[in-house]
Amino acid sequence: DEEKHMRQEREASWEEGREVGREEGREEGRVQGREEGKFEGKIELLRMQIQKKLVKGKSVSEISEELEEEEDVIAQMIREMGEERAADKHLPPKLSH
């Protein structure tokens, strides 16, 4: 009977530990998801700002200076935006700068 009681206590303790671990994992996932969402939002804002400046005829250099980002970063984002537009048949091709 004592063995049965100890086994039940071990199982209960194990289950409690498992549940705590699950909750910690869920919270970690929520935190990571929020961080990823913030990053994606910043990238999307930067893309929108770049697009507006391209429409106005600004160069990569001008955009880089105005948005305080490296020219390489701006140029790469413009290339990626162009590739996305080319993949989407509904959008006209984008002018490259």
Image: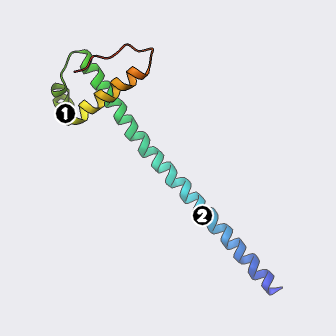
Cα distance in 3D space between marks 1 and 2: 47 Å
Picture colour scheme? rainbow
Q: Identify which residue is drawn at 60% across, 63% down.
A: 20
Q: Tell me which corner region of the image, top left, top right, bottom left or bottom right, holds residue 47.
A: top left
Q: Residues within 10 Å of mark 1 (few under 14, many from 20)?
A: some
Where residue 12 sits: x, y (%)?
Answer: 71, 71
Residue 69 appears anywhere in the view: no
Tell me which label, 1 or 2, sits earlier in the chain: 2
Residue 4 placement (x, y as % from top left): 80, 81
Q: Residue at x 26, y 15 (%)?
A: 55
Q: Is residue 61 left or right of residue 40?
A: left
Residue 50 vs residue 41: left or right?
left
For residue 48, side relative to residue 65 (left or right): right
Query: Where is 86 relative to 71, above or below?
Result: above
Instruction: Rate crowding at label 2 as few (under 14), some (14 to 19) or many (20 or more) other CA atoms within 10 Å.
Output: few
Residue occupying image coordinates x 47% and y 50%: 31
Please give the residue where the numbered disc 1 appears in the rendered image: 71
Q: Which mark is residue 20?
A: 2
Q: Tell me the quarter of the image containing the N terminus.
A: bottom right
- Kind of element beneath mark 1: helix
Q: Secondary structure at mark 2?
A: helix
Mark 1 vs mark 2: in front: 1
Residue 87 placement: quadrant: top left
Image height check: is 18 above or below 49? below
Res 40 label: none
- Give me the residue at 60% from left, 59% from top: 22
Percent of width and height locating residue 7: 75, 79
Res 64 quadrant in image? top left
The picture places residue 29, in percent across and down from the top left corner, at 51, 51
Q: Which amino acid does the dot numbered 1 rest on?
A: Glu
